[in-house]
Image (cartoon, coloured by chain):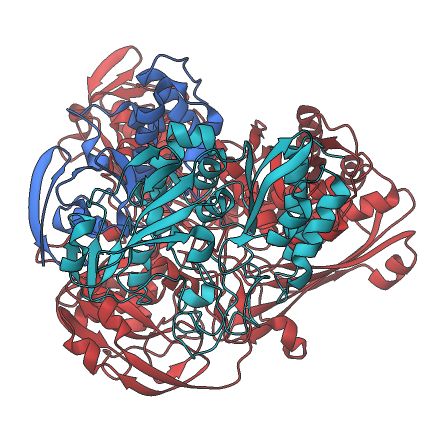
Chain colours: A red, B cyan, C blue
Amino acid sequence: MEQSTSKIIGEPMNRVDGPAKVTGRAEYAGDHQVEGGIAEGFIVEAPAAPGKIVALDVADAEAADGVVSVLTYKTVPQQKPYGSPEDEGRFTQSHAVLENDRVRHFGEPVALVVAETLEQARYAASLVRVEIETEEGVFNALDHKDQAEKPDSVDGLDEVDTQDGDFETQFSQSTHKLEVSYLTGAQHASAMEPHVTVAQWDGETLIVHMAIQIVASAVSAYANTLGIDEANVRIISPFTGGGFGSKLGVHNEAILAALAAKQCGKAVRVAQTRRNLFANGPHRSRHLQELKLGADASGKLRAVRHSSLASMARNYPFAEAPASPTRASYAADAIHTFHRMVKADIPKVDSMRAPGEAIGTLTYETAIDELAEMCGVDPVEFRILNEPTQDPTSGHAFADRRLLDCIRTGAAKFGWSGRVKPGSRMAGRKLVGRGMAVAIRPNTLSPAQAEVKLAADGRLVARLDMTDIGTGTYTILTQIAAETLSMPASQVLVQLGDSRFPETAGSGGSFGASSSGSALLDACAKLKSALSERLTESGVSANAFAMKDGRVLANGKRIELADLIGAEGLSADGAVDPDNHAKGQADYSYGVQFAEVEVDADTGEIRVRRLLGVFDAGRILNRKTARSQLMGGMIFGIGGALLEESLMDDRFGSFMTRDFAEYHIAVNRDVPDLEVHILDGYSEHSNPLGSKGIGELGICGAGPAIANAVHEATGVRVRKFPVHMEDLLDRLPAV
Amino acid sequence: MKPFDYQRLETPEHLGHVEAGRFLGGGTNLIDLMKHQIETPDVLVDVTRAGMDRIEERGDAVLIGSQVSNTDLASHPLIRRDYPVLSSALLSGATQQLRNKATTGGNLLQRTRCQYFYDTARACNKREPGSGCDALDGLNRFHAILGASENCIAVHPSDMAVAMAALGAVVVTRKRDGTEGRIPVTELHRLPGDRPDLDHVLDEGELIVAVELPASPPRLQSYRKVRDRSSYAFAVVSAAIALDLEDGHMRNLRIALGGVAHKPWRATKAEAMLEGKMPEAALFMEALEQEMADAEGHGHNDFKKILAPRVVVAMLRELTGLGGN
Amino acid sequence: MANVSMTVNGRSVSGQCEDRTLLVQFIRENLGLTGTHVGCDTSQCGACVVHVDGKAVKSCTMLAAQADGSEVVTIEGLASGGELHPVQAAFREHHGLQCGFCTPGMIMSAVDMIQRHGGRLDEKTVRQELEGNICRCTGYHNIVKAVLDAASKMGDGTKVAAE
């Protein structure tokens, strides 16, 4: 379909990568083939931890059919110390594996078996004998509250703690007081494509095909781990099969593949199995969140205190900030927020879709619902009543806040008519309840660069090291280039995921589209003005022009591009600098979610019947991909409320729910009647495109809307997530 | 996977002539277990092409070949008409693609889904006799409340077998020496006792050739699977019920429970209390409480003691027309 | 070692592989057809679905030897002459894909479903029968629309409006 050249950004254009993906032609990292073949690496996991390897026998494995090499800490090529250099971030520091005889956590690799085929490697891996002398470990923060510390920093926020206003006084003087604590479970991002890397060496140069969200930081991680120049690392990642935070950084298989390729002198693929992933991939840790809320008789918030306790992996600096939404959602006379962490001997804890907000809105928006009920105020009205005029903690002006528009639109579209007495609405043997909650997620902009090159035949190539992890990057960047240069989208070719392309911050934190899109916008604008100059030089003075099929159309004239830009074409570089945008302003994306659930009156089984979200994410770059991002987030939210939990056996520090039969993510039938509404918007301060982050917004608020609906259905408040039938079973109303 | 020799059985009569090994049906469970080194056969005998893939009506019984796929069995007109509880149980298990591959015999012989059985770093008497049971004091939400032992609290994961238990099905086998065996489905699986490594009573090399369903099953049938998500999840608890109502009295009542024991659990105590009686809600609950008298929880699965009776009572009310209240 | 012969996407192929070679590995490594993906390795996610003798199966939990003599169709075998299969076209049009990793398996399951049900498919059946295909992104909503639209185009039902 030929797109109109006037307005393309925002149009529901079909994915440009659609044909490749529906025919199986899209090449994911594990699909990469190498001339001369690829050896397969299989990870041998530590059966216990923390501790020390006291025996490691690889003789049987080495003797097994097809085995090329077995890497252990005794034989692995030289690496820089894990975590160095200390002053760098977690995604770029050394990620050394098989470093020494120490085992930090359950499932950490103690060996890599490389063989000609996967089954040979898998079997030989089972022949490696390892004995660990274990020490007492810390696995669950709740069992070690005495070791809680204030972390150096928390994810996504400037301050670890905030204390605005006099909490004690405001709380003690409140008419209605709520004091509750919630448990949220550990979760794994569970992208459909497991972590996989194909590595090979070309002399001093490491060439890597990997599943990754941020190419540039992975280059640094390889350089810092292997002690080589960044210029000698080439990463190629044109398609990534989902990330949700889990592919922000490199993981064990990535480094192992590079080391094994060096050791074996040939290309090596290491694919984590789904089981591996629950120990060798990152996870969201369990949290205890304590909330104290106070309101006056009318339902106006006076005091808010939100403190969070969780585990962080020892030697890996990441602390999630569930109190993030609490700082920015509602006005109150005093808001105090705290984050405490216990260092634990567990697999890597890191970002998972909407870190902070996903589980922060889950608890805060549930607590707000409880407080509204105590105050006798409708939950929709309660939120309107407590709408702030400036950022409640920083005091900054809002860059763009239309939360009340979302709430009012949502209430009308959902048909919200106030709450009914909990446990009183039935349909057959099902108890039916409704609930709502607010979605909020900080909007950020990251530095990014882009280059464009226009050829004389009218084709434009845009290059960035940005990734498309499923969000639709290829498509929105195509739209941005086509609209800016007034040319058909079909003549734009966007190339991504190569470390040789200009650097961006990649995909993560919902900043990908705005950041890389703004850089591309800049590059295209520069190309356009350069072309304008050429036009002027050639005697055509035009304020506006369009391009098609190698011709420029200006002032009713058709000029051959070749005559303007010659055979060498015309190039331009662009960039975006976050310091120039939303300075001193509080910048967020917003939304509201309404849910209807049914609870089986006999068994307590919970199913979502209806989910409706209204969102404001500034300017929408592609209505089709944007809707899908929001829907996907909302369904993710069903998982957070009702299904997903990585259960750890705290005696061993090992996750036990290590496949999709145990770790439940929503299946197709779990998807209810689903509605997504997006407000038209343009957030002028946020970035040159006027867009805001959308990839994580949909998950925020979905879980608490469902939990609040479960309460209305049953009268039961469950303060642990996910909510299961047994949490309700013996408290269901007798009907 | 450990290297093995793959062979095919041409017909059941050739059983004595192939090397002794593990039988391979659809392989949807066995091959996974082989990947994890939980099953390490030297010889794999593929029995799917041995002609045991027909469903035949024989006067007093319906004979289901052991290699009939779960999909074909669930969608067979005769099964849908006379044995809807079986069709419904089959369709509630696994997924379309697995049901296409999984066989009747293989479904019966699938192994437990206990996470400790699957995790070779953990102690499991079923996987490694004498190593202990980490599930006992571990994460045991899905585990047994009936008939378990201190050695094993695993449950049998099949839905199909629960329905077959309620239908009084009989497993027909053939041994290597050519003799035939007949085992009621309810006696095919063992309770764990001190040998949890043995799931069933079949001899080494004994092949399930068919499953026989008695003709004229009870008219009222129902299968219900309680689970965490809307589909594609193992049963927290499931139940299959078959009965007739004659002049308002319950006859031929059979109740089988899934997700509560090492085998499909026939609620014989409850059946005995209810057989011949008029439907009555209080009586239902009393009978099920009686059935659960010996039930024992292990922490995370305590709720099944409440859940299982509730599920059966709700089903009985619906089947007998008592309705919700 | 096993000598395995089968028809893949209409082409006769044969090769030698170890008895323990999985069908998905045979397809990806021996035949180079990498559109069939491995997402879980334990037959739970559906990314590896192919058709064996006309039925959708999970190729990660099946031996290549089990498929000996069979007719296998993979995602690469659906489109003909550069023209997308109606199900592929519908997935694209209705945005039934995001990261795309589950897409080949999802499409293969959908084609099998439509072949069995024809134009009689409804939303409930589609959701039920796609239970073995997990999409984490998650595009379930649009996937169902795509399947229903393709089913109606392949049969003679009504068109489903794209969103």
The front one of B92 and B213 is B213
Where is residue A114? Give x, y as percent: 20, 69
Image quadrant in which the C terminus of chain B is located: top right
Tell how many labels.
0
Where is residue A674? Give x, y as percent: 56, 31
Image quadrant in which the N terminus of chain B is located: bottom left
Q: Which quarter of the figure has residue B68? A: top left
Q: Which quarter of the figure has residue A263? A: bottom left
Q: Examine the rendering and report whether any part of residue B324 can be seen.
A: yes
**What residue is at 39 percent from the left and 20 percent from the top?**
C149
Where is residue B172? Give x, y as percent: 33, 49
Determine whether, in the image, residue B239 is placed left or right of residue B105: right
Q: Which quarter of the figure has residue B314? A: top right
The front one of B99 and A233 is B99
Determine whether, in the image, residue C61 is placed left or right of residue A472: left
Q: Is residue A376 positioned above or below A149 on the image?
A: above
Q: Examine the rendering and report whether any part of residue A400 can be seen.
A: no
The front one of A667 and A455 is A667
Residue most toward the top?
A556
Q: Is residue B294 positioned above or below C75 on the image?
A: below
Where is residue A412? Give x, y as percent: 70, 24
Determine whether, in the image, residue C34 is placed left or right of residue A159: left
Q: Is residue A631 positioned above or below A417 on the image?
A: below
